[in-house]
Image (cartoon, helix red, strand yellow):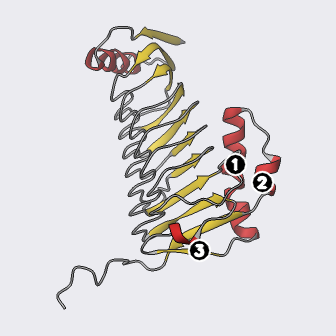
Amino acid sequence: MVKKIDAAGLHYTPLNRQVREAVAAGEDEIVIEHVLGQRFIADGLVGEVTLVVNGVPGGDIGMFMRGPTVVVHGNADHAPGNTMEAGRLVIHGSAGDAVAHSMRGGMVFVRDDIGYRGGIHMKAYNARHPYLVVGGEARAFLGEYMAGGTILLLRRGSKEPFAERGLASGIHGGEIFVRGEVDDGCLAVGAVKKSFGDEERAGIRPLIEEYCRHFGCDAAPLLADDYTRIGPASARPFAGKYTWE
């Protein structure tokens, strides 16, 4: 059963009210047409429902979401997956700043590029482990203050070393995998390069395969390439910064 909603000319409040009413009525799939900047779509939704968003959603799509799958056919504005706890967010385009901000579970896949501060303050606890997979490039401060989870940056089409500044600034948990080389000068306070071997390659393999299933690309070259693994130097990167000397 598919419920269709036309978002043309709708403010985000009545749009999201219609989405919640459809979920409460037991709809399995909701298709939202003509989305143009409406914010907070799918925020706080719970369950197995699938939302298909045709257009360009505004900020915070999927915020606090617990379970649904949201597929965006277009770009997304800032902070998709903000504080998401479970479910999937698949973006067939690029996304703005703070993608997966404070995300604590579930998976976010972005086909192309993301803006600044992707994965800022991602965290993991108990069985919860968030994943952010980006097919293109990420701007500065990727993984800032990261406390847990996994970020995989595939950089499809790029051959030069990754050189955006502030990489993993203040990281104290989790891991970042960047396809290819990473310029040492872009590593921020608290971030170090770690070994990448067979165990780590096997660990990111399901993420690469799922990315390629979503976006219809060949996984073989991505699986064969080498990655730079970034992790925390310690659990308290700023331990001495704010103490009295």
Q: Earlier in the sequence, mark 3 or mark 1?
A: 3
Q: Residue furthest left?
A: 244
User: Residue 5, how many percent across, how many down?
Assistant: 43, 10
The amino acid marked with disc number 2 is: Leu
Residue type marked 3:
Lys
Left or right: where does residue 87 sit relative to residue 209?
Answer: left
Q: Visible in this render: residue 126?
A: no
Q: Nearer the viewer, mark 3 or mark 1?
A: 3
- State the CA–CA distance, disc 2 to disc 3: 20 Å
Q: Quadrant of residue 239?
A: bottom left
Q: CA separation, marks 3 and 1?
A: 21 Å
Residue tagged by mark 1? 208
- Determine crowd level at label 3: few under 14, some 14-19, many 20+ residues with C-alpha closer than 10 A: some
Q: Residue at x 50, y 65 (%)?
A: 174
Q: Which residue is at 40% across, 18% downward?
A: 36
Q: Nearer the viewer, mark 2 or mark 3?
A: 3
Q: Crowding near pointer 1: few (<14 within 10 Å), some, many (20+)?
A: many
Give the residue displayed 43% in from the left and 17% down from the top.
Answer: 35
Q: Nearer the viewer, residue 214 or 113?
A: 113
Question: How far apart in space, not on screen, are marks 1 and 2 (Cα)?
Answer: 7 Å
The residue that disc 2 covers is 223
Q: Give the x, y percent position of residue 151.
A: 55, 55
- Whether residue 158 is visible to the viewer of this picture, yes or no, is yes
Q: Earlier in the sequence, mark 1 or mark 2?
A: 1
Quarter of the image where the N terminus is located: top right
Mark found first going from the N terminus, 2 or 3: 3
**Residue at the disc numbered 3:** 193
- Residue 212, located in which quarter of the rendered image? top right
Secondary structure state at the residue bearing disc 3: strand
Q: What amino acid is at disc 1?
A: Ile
Q: Nearer the viewer, residue 214 or 65?
A: 214
